Image: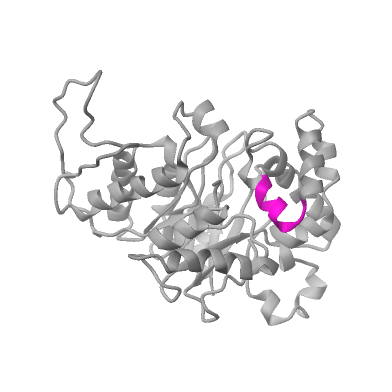
Amino acid sequence: MKFGLQLGYWGAQPPSNHAELVAAAEASGFDSVFTAEAWGSDAYTPLAWWGSSTERVRLGTSVLQMSARTPTACAMAALTLDHLSGGRHVVGLGVSGPQVVEGWYGQQFAKPLARTREYIDIMRQVWARAAPVVSDGPHYPLPLRGEGTTGLGKPLKPIVHPRRADIPVMLGAEGPKNIALTAEIADGWLPLFYTARMADTYNEWLDEGFARPGARRSRETFEICATAQIAITDDRAATFAAIKPFLALYMGGMGSEDTNFHAEVYRRMGYGDVVDEVTALFRSNRKDEAANIIPDEVVEDSATSTMCANRSQSGNVPASRRCSSHPAVPPRSNSWPGYWTEAQCPGPGDRGRPVTPGGAAG
């Protein structure tokens, strides 16, 4: 078990304590620091900024939105940060959803799984630098040919020789097909809302990917970084109440009413009625009500699990339930989603089973 710090993406203003958090993670023996992006702050700029003060922790994105960058642009950013960090970068990718992809990035959302496979293949060609980068497409053809082009496009290698020819790639995946794809082609999985009671189901989906011909990893070498909210508090009810607006946003507002991959995660958990009610309230601009009707059980099951415990109780929590928590994590300040931690299980012994509660859509 390893610990990682998830800085998330910014709220309305830049957070004021991320330098302090990153320094604490580095000093406390955390394995990694992650940043995220939605449709405001990007993931790479703060990761490089705060990461420049570190010497040991891995620097990851959880997640980059694929449609924000072409595969070669993403590979360039990754190889640059990998050099600057001394080989500590981890690329976390996600497809996001059609509302963001088409509404913010102006890109087509169709065939997210095929796009993901093609995207990663191109990035790995860039980092390998074995030959000029080419792709037959259809999603990211290189060189670009056809109507509207000059016909002068040329296959190229990166000018910079990558520090590593194979930078780790993890995928934020939520649906069964995307999770199976992750196990097949990626180095790790970044689940956002993970519930331990569905571990057997998740393992079926992962096993499908591991069993495919040419699968990149096995359970022994595959990482699972499950996000969990960690709060050390004397007021459990207030902490749950603070988390519920975040869950309401993801259940009811992250995506269109009929295409919300985060909502589908909760439906698979058995909370379909809650999702329907939260969505109806959230989309009627009754966001406070949407948050308030979320049962504590839902928060406990997927967002914090056993991470929220009274200080007076924390010494009595069984070790199996303490494994994901870390008392050094301070409370959030002025942005939400806030300062999540990711407990990392690199090839866990129990068949690689994810054992911690806790990526992107799909």
Left or right: residue 69 versus residue 4 is: left
Number of marks in picture: 0
Residue 144 seen anywhere in this rendered image of the structure: yes
Q: Residue at x 55, y 59 (%)?
A: 5
Q: Give residue 252's quadrant in the image.
A: top right
Given residues 57 and 61, the one toward you in this image is 61
Residue 356 seen anywhere in this rendered image of the structure: no
Residue 264 belongs to magenta span: yes
Colour scheme shown: one colour
Q: Residue at x 85, y 44 (%)?
A: 292
Given residues 122 and 343, the one toward you in this image is 122
Report x, y in % for residue 100.
54, 33
Residue 339 belongs to magenta span: no
Report x, y in % for residue 341.
59, 60
Q: Residue at x 82, y 40 (%)?
A: 277
Left or right: residue 28 versus residue 215 is: right
Q: Main secondary structure of the magenta part?
A: helix
Q: Give residue 233's quadrant in the image.
A: bottom right
Report x, y in % for residue 56.
40, 65
Segment tinted magenta in the rendering: 263-271
Given residues 344 and 101, the one toward you in this image is 101
Residue lying at the far top in this picture: please name it: 148
Left or right: residue 309 versus residue 28 is: right
Q: Quadrant of the N terminus?
A: bottom right
Q: Residue at x 68, y 36 (%)?
A: 253
Report x, y in % for residue 279.
76, 37
